[in-house]
Amino acid sequence: MNRIPVGILGATGTVGQRFVQLLDDHPWFQVTALAASDRSVGQRYADACHWLLPTPIPDAARDLVVQPIEPGLECRVVFSALPSGVAGPVEERFARAGHAVCSNAAAHRMDADVPLLIPEVNPDHTALIGEQRRRRGWQGLVVTSANCSTTQLALALKPLHDAFGLRRLSVVTMQAASGAGYPGVPALDLLDNLVPYIGGEEEKVEQEPLKLLGTLEGDRVASAAFVVSAQCNRVPVRDGHTECVSIEFARQPGADEVIAALEGFRGPAEAADLPGSPAHPIVVRREPDRPQPVRDRDAGRGMSVVVGRVRPCPVLHTRFVLLGHNTVRGAAGGSIHNAELLVAQGWVA
Amino acid sequence: MNRIPVGILGATGTVGQRFVQLLDDHPWFQVTALAASDRSVGQRYADACHWLLPTPIPDAARDLVVQPIEPGLECRVVFSALPSGVAGPVEERFARAGHAVCSNAAAHRMDADVPLLIPEVNPDHTALIGEQRRRRGWQGLVVTSANCSTTQLALALKPLHDAFGLRRLSVVTMQAASGAGYPGVPALDLLDNLVPYIGGEEEKVEQEPLKLLGTLEGDRVASAAFVVSAQCNRVPVRDGHTECVSIEFARQPGADEVIAALEGFRGPAEAADLPGSPAHPIVVRREPDRPQPVRDRDAGRGMSVVVGRVRPCPVLHTRFVLLGHNTVRGAAGGSIHNAELLVAQGWVA
Amino acid sequence: MNRIPVGILGATGTVGQRFVQLLDDHPWFQVTALAASDRSVGQRYADACHWLLPTPIPDAARDLVVQPIEPGLECRVVFSALPSGVAGPVEERFARAGHAVCSNAAAHRMDADVPLLIPEVNPDHTALIGEQRRRRGWQGLVVTSANCSTTQLALALKPLHDAFGLRRLSVVTMQAASGAGYPGVPALDLLDNLVPYIGGEEEKVEQEPLKLLGTLEGDRVASAAFVVSAQCNRVPVRDGHTECVSIEFARQPGADEVIAALEGFRGPAEAADLPGSPAHPIVVRREPDRPQPVRDRDAGRGMSVVVGRVRPCPVLHTRFVLLGHNTVRGAAGGSIHNAELLVAQGWVA
Amino acid sequence: MNRIPVGILGATGTVGQRFVQLLDDHPWFQVTALAASDRSVGQRYADACHWLLPTPIPDAARDLVVQPIEPGLECRVVFSALPSGVAGPVEERFARAGHAVCSNAAAHRMDADVPLLIPEVNPDHTALIGEQRRRRGWQGLVVTSANCSTTQLALALKPLHDAFGLRRLSVVTMQAASGAGYPGVPALDLLDNLVPYIGGEEEKVEQEPLKLLGTLEGDRVASAAFVVSAQCNRVPVRDGHTECVSIEFARQPGADEVIAALEGFRGPAEAADLPGSPAHPIVVRREPDRPQPVRDRDAGRGMSVVVGRVRPCPVLHTRFVLLGHNTVRGAAGGSIHNAELLVAQGWVA
């Protein structure tokens, strides 16, 4: 099979680099276009990019010449790793020009006609694309992936919501430095220290799960009806967000039922066969002291989330600890996963 | 005034060292006896101790000869920095022999006739000592300080409970490595990593506040009636425990009322004049990103707790972030503070 | 081809775990025996072992029953990850019983009739095995790999010694925490701190290179004649030792000559085809700020060493920075590499 | 005595903040002017400054209004914490306007008529000020303090040079993050990582000691004649630079002689009585594993340097490990110390 040509917007940043890394040797996609800001345009990618990942720059990307972030790139799918402040109108121009835009930026996440998508959670939400094209007159399309902390949370919540009905939940995050990009957080803020605040993060974690777990009704998504409280902290960890979660359900389950629901979760069949789908979207650990970032973030090549310490909560119903890889499942890997779903569903021909 | 002679049990450990440091130049107390396990007995303290604090060993302690952990020490007050596993019977022997034991260990904390004490929170609970002496036939006494995470939490909860009535609360902690002593947590567990589990900690944080905020009724303490959920994590920080707290009250206050109650708190008059009492037991910060361990743990020379990010909670009523110095207010400093209260109340003559 | 059965002594420790991980799917070797101390004997490996690596326990090892560390294991090659204090006599018993022992321990490294071996550096030193068997009456054999800091240093020194003649050199190391095993270094020693001392390390780094770069003369190795000064530090890094090296040569080369010698180095042909041999044993980086542990330790799957900042030294002749993966090339990976050489040379049939 | 009014240029940066902190309650100086870049001018210092130190902003500074960085400030002494790129001409304007400028910037350090000054090392070098005023026509003056790594090194070298004559020396530094200011080094560069490069640092450490230990000859300083090799690394430590030093002397001393020379050093009498002079400029530790940043950087309130592991070197003559507080002795504290010397010598009336 000929691989589908894809491009990356914001290819030199940390999320952009992760796209380049994860797309190397992808069975369905081939990177044919790398776009970045003006000061990089015209340079070889290897020269333009201060490469920060431990694996070498893929040979296929090394010599590509960086192009401007404007339609006209030779590719059908476009991955957007742009800062949220500039992503909105740029992504629209690409969609108008016929590209399938899989965005990691926040700009369009909450638009009523834009799917906020996790393949195992709500693959049917791509039905919004029809309405999106009608209203906006686009030949292409935009789908978005959620905030990193939201993505791993929503994945773990999905089977629990289906089985027991979420009423309200509290999540306290301990987030890795890579979530802020590079240079990102100063070392003096994370040596012998943590910062109990991440600008804009708590709002996203409180709102996005309601759309992700919402119900498709005709050409719109009806938000789920539970309530989320999020308290977000930055801690001295490179990769891997840890979340302490406590949930009140419509019907209180036993810890065993919760574990069974999490472990048994596979997502819809259409998601199960995508190249990026891990065998186990949710891994449950029984040890008392897991999950831990350095030991669990690479589960399922960074696409599984890991849950541990499932136990009753004396204030709400059930507590557990949740961990996911914030720049794989929570960013570039999630957007690639979305593109795979679009291909499987026939949106990208 | 002649200073009161005091001794330290477990003087060579990390908490014992903190006692030695904080008691240097104390206006009321003079360290006259240092006791430790058999392999240190007979050595000069400076030789027996692998001193780990950044300030030098106080001259007054340097040449004291380490003694066995048995009654007969030349001192009236005894500070216990013993491991909880051995502390219980040892502390009883010292109390029987007439010493006032101020313990940092967990062994007797929940005994019905032993005060669990924070001078600004429940100084009246020392009334239990009368019953303690009657039942046990002791000439001396035992009072205890709470677990480090509990102490800072209870201090912040006290004015809120008085003003608005606690119903239930959820606390997620991010605790410093020093809380586990030395050698304590392996570096491989805290480099690029955190551990979402601390053995026995959550139980303490869920139970001890109920006694601390309980009501003295005759010769017993009636537990407070609220419910606590604690989720405890170890993070790569040297000193200073951070806690994300969410509370439901009997009457929901505005954030301004919460701040006013916290900032206005001074504790009872009898606590205000103790040498270890900070001018402000609770400091409230308005910046969006505070408190932080490295920047706030030394507030009030480590005896203040610092609260920030006071705001409404969509799941319970009110959220905030709380930080305290776990080996000062949360350990040695807290026990010394308790001893000061005993002196002020006339229990130590 | 049937894979050669191999066993691991000390299989539950950190180096032992790395052996298990690296031997998974090895083309020549199959793990058939795992041995550890008494308290693990009789348990499934997965139960006996507090597994610390980010990849899961290999399925082939998971259910093996841990055996005592005594001859009688079903395997031809034995990898020793034993502590140096106990390794000596145990390894001798295994050699006497006919096993080929590839040891990572220090016990026999400096024995005159035991090869201290790096396949790219001194594969001819296996000629000592003949003398070893004669003198000791062994059917099996013992070969050793060097200390982790020495291994990466010797690899970089080899082409320079051949080309320019080493006279004297100074090396200051910044070593990762994993080098001390688990629990190893306490977190309180490596949070906001470093320790300028590693017991016994400097002596090894000063002596072992002389044997590694020595010349085989008949049935003995004549030590190389240069002088090494080593100053060893433990720093807050998980994996990857960094070394600042300064060298005086018999003939002072230009920086370009040094780079050419390092980059051109491939080792003898017999080493080049081993499964564990990286395409480039020594990788030279031109960026001013490389190598760095997190970005370079995985070069050549942890089997390459990375050199950067090659430049003249105003005190000696040439300076550079050297980095290697201390638990791959510097420990388990190096011993497996040695076993591969023994197979290629016909010592293990 | 009326305290001398002093101002701080670059008062809102990390070094500027350290000046403000260290000058609080100074017996000779009173902060009367704080100057910073345009965007801070006109604001209260407490509002303009993102205060990063653990102690609170001194009350005396809190309400000062930030002024432009131009002559006309109400103060006699001016401390310059400006970036080296802009410091040069600004400092000249202040000197011309009659201020005594004590600079922490590199701009004028190597000017022939500007003292590079450490009170215990070369207080006589202030004699250059006469020539400086003649040539430049200034009423005021400029003196400079050395680079942070140089300062602590020169202090330790001074008694050794006097006693044994330095010939050549090699120093490998492990430098703290605070040396790069704020935001400075990204956390992703120092979590589980180190960077073996600091731009411009090695040149300074190789050149500045020659001037500091040079000899005053008439109205010029004759450089010392030894050679320095410096290799500089950034490591995950907040404060405190550690240096591994190896030295060749004109006459090889025993380790005992080296220790005696270091411990006995007090500097000239005129330096000994300054408020900032520690009782022991050089502290020697005998433990095998000291000095360490977190345990030794506060020696002498950050104004002592700490030496450990004094031992012979097989390549040069003598090795040791050296540690100093880079933002106290190595920056703000050093410049204040210089100002004290100027007062004691009568240059500031």
Image (spheres, coloured by chain):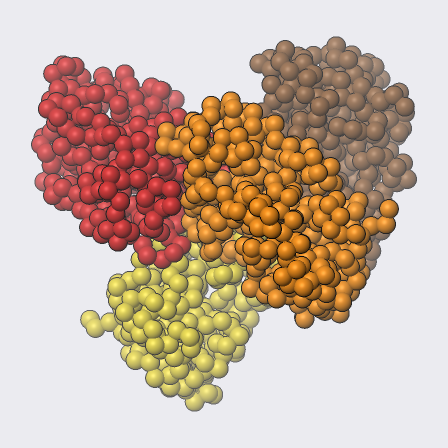
Chain colours: A red, B orange, C yellow, D brown
Q: Which residue lies furthest to the bottom in this view?
A: C137
Q: In which quarter of the image is the N terminus of chain D?
A: top right
- The reply to whether residue D231 is in sight is no
Point 63% across, 11% down: residue: D42
- How many numbered discs, if any? 0
Vertical side of B113 occupied by C85: above or below: below
Q: In this view, does C55 lie to the left or right of D286?
A: left
Q: In which quarter of the image is the C terminus of chain D?
A: top right
Vertical side of B221 occupied by B259: above or below: above
Point 73% across, 17% down: residue: D33
Residue D80 x/y as whole percent: 70, 23
Q: Is residue A235 left or right of residue B38?
A: left
Q: Nearer the viewer, residue D165 or B104?
A: B104
Vertical side of C104 occupied by B325: above or below: above
Point 40% across, 82% down: residue: C70
Residue B133 x/y as whole percent: 67, 59
The picture quadrant where one finds residue D130 is top right
Residue A309 x/y as whole percent: 35, 51
Vertical side of C276 occupied by D268: above or below: above
Q: Nearer the viewer, residue D47 or A24?
A: D47
The picture quadrant where one finds residue A183 is top left
Q: In this view, does C75 lie to the left or right of C178?
A: left
- The reply to whether residue D212 is in sight is yes
Residue C176 x/y as whole percent: 50, 54
Q: Which residue lies furthest to the front in this view?
A: B218
Q: Which of D309 and D154 is in front in this view?
A: D309
